[in-house]
Image (cartoon, helix red, strand yellow):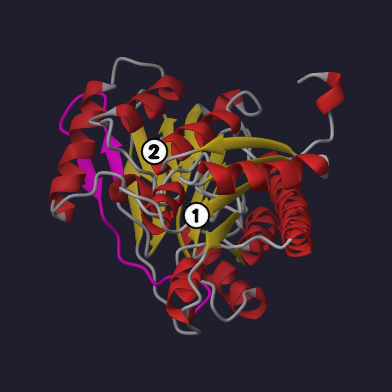
Amino acid sequence: MDSAEVGKFTILIIDDNPVDSELLSKLLLNEGYKTIIANTGAEGLKKAAEARPDLIMLDIMMPGEDGFAVIKKMKRTPEIASIPVIFITAISEIESKMMGFDLGAVDYIVKPFKFQEVQARVRLQLKLNIATNALIADQARRLEEIHEGQTSILVTPDQYPDARFGIYYSSLHEAGGDFYDVLPVTEKIYGYFIGDVSGHDIKTSFVTHSLKALIKQNCSLIYSPLESMQIINDVLLEILPEDKFLTACYARLNRATMKMSIVSAGHPPVLYVPVSGEIQMIDLTGTILGMFNDVSFEQHDMTVSKGDRFYLFTDGLIEQYGGDKSFSDHMDDLKEGCDLVRKFPVNDAVRKLFDHKLDDNFNQEDDIVIFGLEV
């Protein structure tokens, strides 16, 4: 941008009447604004996308596409949808004005133009837009801090190399509800926890922070995984907001005895990938956490072999497949994916499992965690 134009506001005028558009442009230029003129709706849309003006002044009555049709297209175009629009109208009927507001216009001015009215309405909408953008930027900064705080408490494979795990984590919003943790219970015993807190708001982020401390305190050697889950539920009943609950899965692996214990609290099944043999689905019954005093869980104990793998995931992985498939079909897809990624290191396998059958129409609708661990 030329240094002489720093601080200027750009206003796009879309009006098929050259006399009106030139008059309005002159009024604005005299006040120090930069103006761009378009004589048709199509030209206006093109110039809006190119110039990204600070404000658009749009005539309602135009041949071909009228102002209503143009603003509809603007609001469906992400790059220009947030630009404020003032309608230009010679129509006094309230229905037309209300329709403009319903479509996203922020104000209107009436022909013939009154200089002081144009000046006042343009200034007001630019001030409001500046304030709105500043508020959005501040909220985004705060949410980014929350997101950074959340991700900072999530462990990475290099922190516990002996735990032999891989992770794929993708939060839908800054305040994600999915959570995982790895706990070195002893030198040979590791706990692996994955959870999904309901919601994606600010309260969710505080729950995940509390959950990490809660898991560390109660997933110790003196408690079985089933007992740990019961204690966690008792505490969550006291600290969770009324509208929050948690699904979770806790797996504890003893590499000295080669024993694995798994407990689920309303969470998706675990996929067991033995070194040799068919992939198995471990689907356990269990009550969700933080909602009920009376809960019951099922603990699955098994003997494992070196090189066996387990995959834990949140329901966002199933939801991403979409379509009309049954739950059984979704699990068959994941089994196929687990089989295809056997030859890859576990840290690479989780990403490749996510990519399995992923197409260009993918639209993430929930947080996704894929957790892989190898015996």
Residue drawn at 23 percent across, 38 percent down: 334
The residue to which callout 2 is attached is: 42
| 235 over 52 or under it: above or below | below
| 208 over 350 or under it: above or below | below
Distance (Cα) linking label 2 and label 1: 13 Å
Residue at the outermost bottom position: 293
Residue at the outermost top position: 343
| 282 inside magenta stretch | yes
Discs 2/1, front: 1
**Would residue 46 be visible to someone looking at this image?**
yes
Q: Which residue is nearer to you in this view: 113 or 340? A: 113
Secondary structure under the numbered disc 2 in the rendered image = helix
- Callout 2 crowding tier (Cα within 10 Å): few <14, some 14–19, many ≥20: some
Q: Which residue is nearer to you in this view: 241 or 4? A: 4
Residue at the outermost front position: 19
Q: Quadrant of the N terminus?
A: top right
The residue to which callout 1 is attached is: 59
Magenta residues span 270-291
Q: Which residue is nearer to you in this view: 49 or 245? A: 49
Q: Which mark is residue 123?
A: none
Q: Residue 114 falls in which quadrant of the image?
A: bottom right
In the rendered image, residue 4, in percent from the top left (x then y), is placed at 86, 23
In the rendered image, residue 306, in percent from the top left (x then y), is placed at 37, 24
Quick check: 133 left or right of 262?
A: right
Quick check: 21 left or right of 168?
A: right
Secondary structure under the numbered disc 1 in the rendered image = strand
Q: Amino acid at mark 1?
A: Asp
The rendered magenta stretch, by its main secondary structure, is classed as loop
